């Protein structure tokens, strides 16, 4: 990790301005993504996962939501500060994104070939002199769409859900991005197709040497697909680290609780584990650690002071007073 | 698509028969044309002779049968007042009406679409509220009042445009604007809401993720999807315009079919009214068919 990260998010803060007050949807999120790395971003609904992604690519709702602080360093510059037209060249070409719902992500009135080809028209790649049509067929082949010549002429409604998702992946790949953000890419697919798609995604990531941010609430998917994992709670990252370590030996009580909530085979008849309480109201967050009201290991200090991120030398970090992570800060 | 078109044409023909039946009966209920054609002191025998000559002495169902038979052969009878074939009379006035309706539709479509898209893009701003306010006004104000106000302000007070009649392009402008205001408002509101729906979809977000500019997102990815309901309304509006000319042509003394229909109704000139209404109904049916066929072009999921 001595070389610079491809993408470095520093203290990102994105707030929603609602009539009831300011909601800190992303509250000081930081992480690094090194070349070829994949990171899972997990957390409950509303923990701010998608908001982090949308802030990075600068596609937040036009009204009431704004990134108010932090930096997103990409290729040596803070892309939060560049102009909108410069940002358009980053979107798609440098940072690609796969949206949640494959059934809705393709425009119903244009052919699939047209929609994939648009990437080449928007981001001309001088080094590749072949006609756009050829390149479209190539990238469709890469995502394993059968008989691409014929399929390219069809419309999205003639595609199955899995094929549409692969088309969306093809669109992302066509820009040859350095970072690919996949925001819950498989939630609306059935399980077998989910698996297929994740395998494909991982394969493509390794082939192209892209970084991958995979947003999900499924720890199983993270375990299979990612190198690192960041766990989000109430707009903050509460724990990061290599997937195996975090899942085997969670340092934050919230991660621990998430892991316990996974149904186990053979557990028939036993009640599924459930984290007590509710996620905090972000308009009026509890004092100190946001997880403290639901935490089994809460101590008096937890309700007073927000725990800082403690990191060890292996890239593990957690924001918890009770964690046994040995801080190595120089 | 051919079977669909043929089927729709057959239904349209049935529709025309229905329309002509209604107008046929309505006209005969409205009164006896000989009361207007002959002087007050005409003898009853003369009146009867006139009725026989016009074929009005036969029972109404028989009259209708005769009318239908002739109409299928293209003969709508002779005008009682102008003594010439009714359909040729109507057709001679049609270009003026079509010209007016076409310009009005063009104005309505361009303004409706542009202001609707603009309002959608500026949602929540003062401009959005302003556009919506003006458009609500456009919907609420009656056509005849708008026409009279325009004549009074633009023509009479400012002296910018002619008050009435047909001649230059400038003669067309006021009646066309009068006719356009209402449909423009309706189109604008529908375009706005339809565009807002579309702009909220994931495929629009993906278009942005791909690196499209704002205007390309709206005009390329948004408009074609948003236009599907708008096209329906536009088709209805265009067809309505041909009928609406009755009011506007009367206000502006525009020599089109609308004015002709009013004159013919007042003169109880049955054949002319029948011919004109049948023609307008046929245009209406034709436009509706055209709109349905246009869906297939706009939305690849629709195939006939």
Image (cartoon, coloured by chain):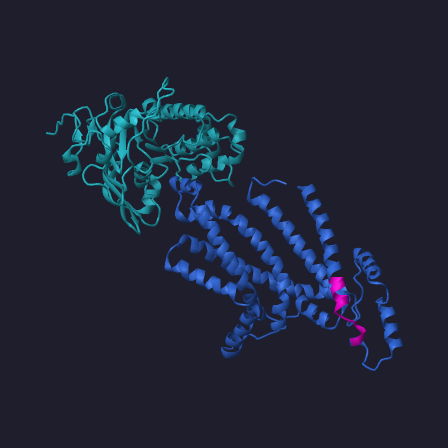
Chain colours: A cyan, B blue
Furthest residue toward left? A330
Q: Percent from the top left, x then y, of residue B203?
A: 44, 40
Q: In this picture, is A79 found above or below B37? A: above
Which residue is painted at 34% across and 41% down in the image? A89
Question: Position of A64 compared to B182: left or right?
Answer: left
- Write down the quadrant of residue A48 in the picture: top left
Q: Percent from the top left, x then y, of residue B247?
A: 62, 68
Q: Percent from the top left, x then y, of residue A101?
A: 43, 35
Question: Position of B155 compared to A250: left or right?
Answer: right
Which residue is painted at 30% across and 31% down in the image? A41
Could you tell me which quadrant the C terminus of chain A lies in? top left
- Depth check, front residue: B193 or A290: A290
- Write down the quadrant of residue B264 in the picture: bottom right
Q: Is residue B33 magenta?
A: yes
Q: In this picture, is A314 found above or below B76? A: above
What residue range appears in magenta? B23-35
Which residue is painted at 86% across and 64% down in the image? B58
Could you tell me which quadrant the N terminus of chain A lies in? top left
């Amino acid at each position: 990790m001595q070389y610079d990260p491809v993408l470095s998010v520093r203290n990102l803060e994105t707030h929603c301005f609602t009539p009831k007050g300011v909601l800190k949807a992303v509250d000081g999120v930081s992480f690094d993504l090194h070349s070829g790395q994949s990171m899972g971003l997990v957390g409950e609904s509303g923990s701010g996962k998608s908001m982090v992604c949308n802030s990075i690519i600068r596609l937040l709702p036009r009204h009431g939501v704004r990134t108010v602080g932090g930096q997103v360093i990409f290729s040596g510059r803070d892309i939060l500060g560049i102009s909108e037209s410069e940002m358009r060249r980053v979107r798609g070409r440098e940072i690609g994104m796969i949206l949640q719902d494959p059934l809705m992500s393709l425009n119903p009135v244009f052919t699939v070939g047209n929609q994939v080809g648009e990437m080449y028209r928007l981001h001309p790649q001088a080094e590749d002199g072949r006609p756009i049509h050829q390149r479209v067929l190539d990238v469709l082949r890469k995502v394993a769409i059968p008989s691409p010549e014929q399929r390219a002429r069809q419309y999205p409604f003639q595609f199955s859900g899995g094929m549409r998702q692969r088309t969306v992946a093809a669109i992302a790949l066509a820009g040859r991005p350095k970072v690919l953000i996949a925001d819950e890419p498989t939630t609306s697919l059935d399980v077998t197709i989910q698996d297929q798609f994740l395998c494909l995604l991982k394969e493509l990531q390794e082939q192209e040497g892209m970084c991958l941010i995979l947003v999900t609430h499924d720890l199983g998917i993270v375990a299979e697909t990612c190198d690192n994992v960041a766990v989000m709670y109430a707009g903050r990252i509460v724990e990061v680290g290599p997937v195996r370590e975090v899942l085997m030996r969670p340092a934050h009580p919230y991660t621990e609780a998430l892991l316990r909530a996974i149904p186990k085979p053979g557990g028939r008849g036993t009640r599924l584990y459930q984290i007590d309480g509710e996620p905090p109201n972000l308009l009026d967050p509890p004092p100190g650690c946001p997880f403290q009201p639901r935490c089994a290991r809460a101590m008096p200090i937890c309700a007073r002071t927000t725990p800082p991120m403690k990191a060890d030398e292996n890239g593990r970090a957690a924001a918890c007073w009770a964690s046994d992570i040995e801080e190595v800060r120089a | 698509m051919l079977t669909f078109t043929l089927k729709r044409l057959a239904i349209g023909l049935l529709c025309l028969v229905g329309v002509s039946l209604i107008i046929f009966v309505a006209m005969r209920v409205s009164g006896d044309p000989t009361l207007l054609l002959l002087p007050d002191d005409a003898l009853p025998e003369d009146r009867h002779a006139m009725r026989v000559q016009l074929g009005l002495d036969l029972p109404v169902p028989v009259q209708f049968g005769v009318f239908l038979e002739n109409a299928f052969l293209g003969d709508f009878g002779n005008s009682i007042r102008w003594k010439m074939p009714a359909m040729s009379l109507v057709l001679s006035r049609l270009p003026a009406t079509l010209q007016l309706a076409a310009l009005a539709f063009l104005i309505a479509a361009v303004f409706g679409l542009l202001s609707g898209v603009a309002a959608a893009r500026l949602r929540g701003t003062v401009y959005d509220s302003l556009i919506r306010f003006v458009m609500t006004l456009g919907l609420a104000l009656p056509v005849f009042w708008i026409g009279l106000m325009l004549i009074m302000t633009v023509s009479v007070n400012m002296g910018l445009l002619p008050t009435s009649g047909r001649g230059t392009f400038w003669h067309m402008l006021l009646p066309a604007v009068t006719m356009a205001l209402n449909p423009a408002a309706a189109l604008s509101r529908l375009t706005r809401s339809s565009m807002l729906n579309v702009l909220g979809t994931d495929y629009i977000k993906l278009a942005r993720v791909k690196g499209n500019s704002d205007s390309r997102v709206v005009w390329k990815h948004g408009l074609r999807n948003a236009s599907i309901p708008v096209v329906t309304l536009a088709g209805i509006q265009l067809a309505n315009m041909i009928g609406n000319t009755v009011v506007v042509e009367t206000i502006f003394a525009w020599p089109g079919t609308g004015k002709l229909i009013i004159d013919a109704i007042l003169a109880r000139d049955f054949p002319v009214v029948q011919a004109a209404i049948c023609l307008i109904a046929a245009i209406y049916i034709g436009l509706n068919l055209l709109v349905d066929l246009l869906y297939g072009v706009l939305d690849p999921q629709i195939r006939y």
